Image (spheres, grey):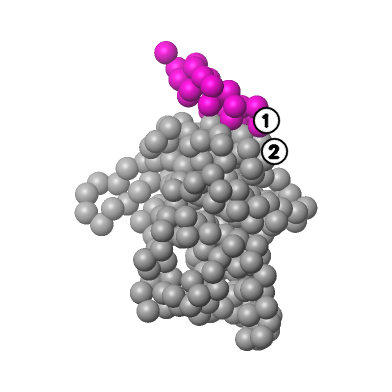
Amino acid sequence: MLELTNLHARVVPEDGPSREILKGLSLSVPKGEVHAIMGPNGSGKSTLSYVLTGRGGYEVTEGAALYEGESLLSLPPETRAAKGLFLSFQYPLEIAGVPVMTFVRAAMNAQRKARGEAEVSAPDFLKLSRIAAQQLRIDPEMLKRPLNVGFSGGEKKRLEIYQMLMLQPRFMILDETDSGLDIDALKVVADGVNALRGPDRSMLVITHYQRLLDYIKPDRVHILSAGRIVKSGGPELAHELEKSGYDTVMGTP
């Protein structure tokens, strides 16, 4: 489903010199699988998520990124989203004056229009919204408030998963979804994510800590360091990292 080959990318700030972050990253995530990426701070984990979803300020200088056989790099962000890519942000944005439900319904209909599908009706949207909110234990009143404005970290993360349940993406990137969550909130969020697992969907779970992977169990775990994948293995690799640390597992002196 996702095939990255020798991917090089740099951050291009508005002022100051550019800096290469991804330095020859190769990764394959087959359809229906959940892969986890772990790595030290500054290794390029968030940069990878931004490059895949087309965030501005990043430039791919070499390599390829194929999604279902089609190059992602030539597509604008909204087209990538319509084709089923979704990024759950580490730090979700606040949008004052735009209620959560208004934002999500607009996103759903924009994606449906791009795919040539009919817009979701108000009654159908409300029915889907109620189901998703109940699953994530979200107070319906919260969905009437401006997006993420005044919400706690845990509430923001639940809303990210609420959006996933509503939009039903085909490839999900979770960027440190566990940050800011207590254990009860983590279980609820993980249940929402696991409800989306299926043979036609894949996930890339980015995390620092193994605890998230106790609830969202990956098929493969990859260690990202200095902009490239340096080691891959099964779920046991995350436990090894938790026990011994990056330096020991990667053989760094």
Q: What is the span of residues highlighted in magenta in the rendered image?
A: 230-253
Three-letter code, disc 1: Gly
In this view, the residue in front, 213 or 110, is 213
Secondary element at image label 2: loop
Three-letter code, disc 2: Asp
In this view, the residue in front, 252 or 180, is 180
Image point (44%, 52%), residue name: 90
Q: Position of residue 131 (x, y in %)?
A: 67, 70
Disc number for residue 219: 2
**How crowded is the residue under tag 2: few (<14 C-alpha within 10 Å), some, or many (20+)?**
some
Pointer 1 and pointer 2: residues touching (CB < 8 Å)?
yes
Q: Position of residue 249 (x, y in %)?
A: 53, 20
With respect to residue 39, does 83 lie above or below? Answer: below
With respect to residue 88, does 30 lie above or below? Answer: above
Total residue callouts? 2
In this view, the residue in front, 88 or 142, is 142
Marks 1/2: CA–CA distance:
6 Å
Disc number for residue 234: 1
